[in-house]
Image: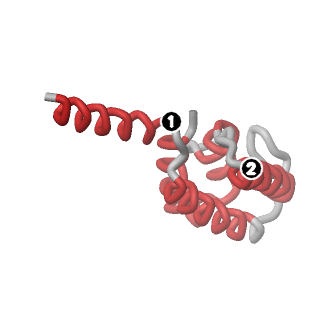
């Protein structure tokens, strides 16, 4: 009976930890995609969105936010992903500036952000 209890407790704790503790592999994959997005975004200029007057302005804000996320992860803190998540929602700032060129990458990032954001 005690062995069965220990196994059940271990399964439960591992399940809970998966939701509480940042998954390093998931964050590494996300950061890789966010770096790709930063590179792609740097190729655009002009345009506008609801929140930014140009692609350059959005790129600066994006780069700053990406640096904050990386710093939090380096300091073993769970990063706030809400702003980045909002930028990658369909028909939001990312789509306004990158259009079809960035759609596949945006969909991929959006799913990861949805999973990882608090």
* Residue displayed at 72% across by 55% down: 74
Q: Nearer the viewer, residue 90 or 73?
A: 73
| Image coords of residue 11 (percent x, y) | 29, 38
| Image coords of residue 105 (percent x, y) | 54, 61
* Residue 47 in view in this figure: no
Q: How is the image coloured?
A: secondary structure
Q: In this view, does 16 lie to the left or right of 44?
A: left
Q: Residues within 10 Å of mark 2 (few under 14, many from 20)?
A: few
Question: Where, by quadrant of the figure, is residue 56 drawn?
Answer: bottom right
* Residue displayed at 68% across by 51% down: 73
* Residue displayed at 52% across by 41% down: 21
Q: Which mark is on residue 41?
A: none
Disc 2: which residue: 75
Q: Nearer the viewer, residue 74 or 82?
A: 74
* Position of the C terminus by quadrant: top right
Name of the residue lying farthest toward the left: 1
Q: In this view, does 114 lie to the left or right of 87?
A: left
| Image coords of residue 83 (percent x, y) | 69, 39
Query: Real-space Cα distance between discs 2 and 1?
Result: 17 Å
* Residue displayed at 65% across by 36% down: 82
| Image coords of residue 6 (percent x, y) | 26, 34
Disc 1: which residue: 20
Q: Is residue 5 left or right of residue 94?
A: left
Q: Residues within 10 Å of mark 1 (few under 14, many from 20)?
A: few
Point out the tag, 2 or 1, that comes first from the N-terminus.
1
Question: Where, by quadrant of the figure, is residue 1 drawn?
Answer: top left
* Residue 67 in view in this figure: yes
Query: Element type at marker 1?
Result: helix
**Count of marks overlaid on the render:** 2
Query: Element type at marker 2?
Result: loop
């Amino acid at each position: 009976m005690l062995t069965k209890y220990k196994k059940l407790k271990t399964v439960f704790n591992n399940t809970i930890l998966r939701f509480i503790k940042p998954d390093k592999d998931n964050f590494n994959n996300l950061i890789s995609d966010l770096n790709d997005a930063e590179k792609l975004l740097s190729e655009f200029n002009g345009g506008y969105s609801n929140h930014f007057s140009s692609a350059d302005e959005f790129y600066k804000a994006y780069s700053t936010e990406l640096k904050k996320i990386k710093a939090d992860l380096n300091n073993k803190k769970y990063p706030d992903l809400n702003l980045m998540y909002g930028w990658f929602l369909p028909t939001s700032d990312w789509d306004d500036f990158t259009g079809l060129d960035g759609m596949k990458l945006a969909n991929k990032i959006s799913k990861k952000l949805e999973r990882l954001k608090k």
